């Protein structure tokens, strides 16, 4: 069985992430979307909230699982007997950081390969940060964030702004 891991912060999950999940789930037998715990960042949503949000929006994919891990993704891949890490490449700016991570992951776990999926044209410039910024200015999120999560994102941003 070909298992792939799609690691990320997903704070929050966007339609760009979801597009990648849909495409990768067609290529691999099982795709595990893994929320990585990054203690250096102050997230908008807790890990538990992000897990629930992702589970809600990927429930229509039979071969997609959702999990979290507070260690190295290369170790997680070993634990899950996955040979592939999937990452998305958007504009050129992703390239250097992603190559560096792929090399480090390969050093830690030589069995693992990183597969890059090119972002779809529509989502090339979409990121979780952009969604948060748009929400802060009251923009319409319907083309960028999963429909089910828009109200929760707007509410959390409002609370953060103290409104
Ligand atoms: P991280 O903090 O690990 O970069 P993100 O949640 O920001 O976590 O992104 C997870 C992965 O999804 C990364 O490989 C990123 O390049 C990819 N990604 C994010 N947004 C998009 C998008 N709009 N289209 C394609 N890939 C994306």
Image (cartoon, rainbow, N blue to C red):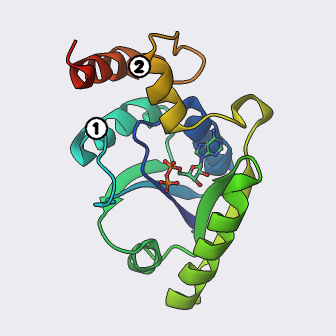
Classify residue 150 as left or right of residue 82.
left
Q: Is residue 122 above or below residue 23?
A: above
Q: Is residue 121 above or below residue 84?
A: above
Classify residue 125 as left or right of residue 148.
right
Badge 1: residue crowd in 10 Å (few <14, some 14–19, many ≥20): some
Say which residue label 2 marks. 136
- Residue 2 visible to the viewer: no
Badge 2: residue crowd in 10 Å (few <14, some 14–19, many ≥20): some
Q: Nearer the viewer, mark 1 or mark 2?
A: 2
How many callouts does the rendering have?
2
Please report contact status of discs 1 and 2: CB closer than 8 Å, yes or no. no
Q: Residue at x 52, y 55 (%)?
A: 31
Instruction: Specify the quadrant that holds the N terminus.
Output: bottom right
Residue 126 position, x and y percent, is 62, 34
Q: Which mark is residue 45?
A: 1
Q: Residue at x 40, y 73 (%)?
A: 76
Residue 53 position, x and y percent, is 34, 33
Classify residue 126 as left or right of residue 62.
right
Q: Residue at x 56, y 90 (%)?
A: 107
Q: Is mark 2 within 8 Å of ligand 1?
A: no
Between 1 and 137, the residue placed more toward the observer is 137
What distance separates the C-alpha of mark 1 from that of mark 2? 15 Å
Label 1 SS? loop
Label 2 SS? helix
């Amino acid at each position: 069985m070909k298992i792939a891991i799609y690691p990320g912060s997903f704070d929050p999950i966007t339609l760009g992430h979801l597009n990648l999940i849909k495409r990768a789930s067609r290529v691999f037998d099982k795709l595990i979307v893994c929320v990585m715990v990054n203690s250096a960042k102050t997230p908008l949503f807790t890990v538990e909230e992000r897990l629930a949000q992702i589970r809600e929006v990927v429930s229509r994919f039979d071969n997609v699982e959702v999990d979290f891990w507070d260690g190295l993704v290369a170790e997680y891949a070993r634990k899950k007997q996955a040979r592939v890490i999937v990452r998305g490449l958007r504009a050129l700016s992703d390239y250097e950081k992603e190559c560096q991570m792929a090399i480090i992951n390969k050093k830690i776990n030589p069995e693992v390969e990183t597969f890059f999926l090119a972002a779809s044209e529509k989502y090339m410039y979409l990121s979780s940060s952009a969604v948060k910024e748009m929400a802060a200015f009251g923009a319409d999120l319907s083309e960028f964030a999963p429909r089910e999560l828009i109200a929760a994102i707007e509410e959390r941003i409002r609370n953060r702004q103290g409104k």
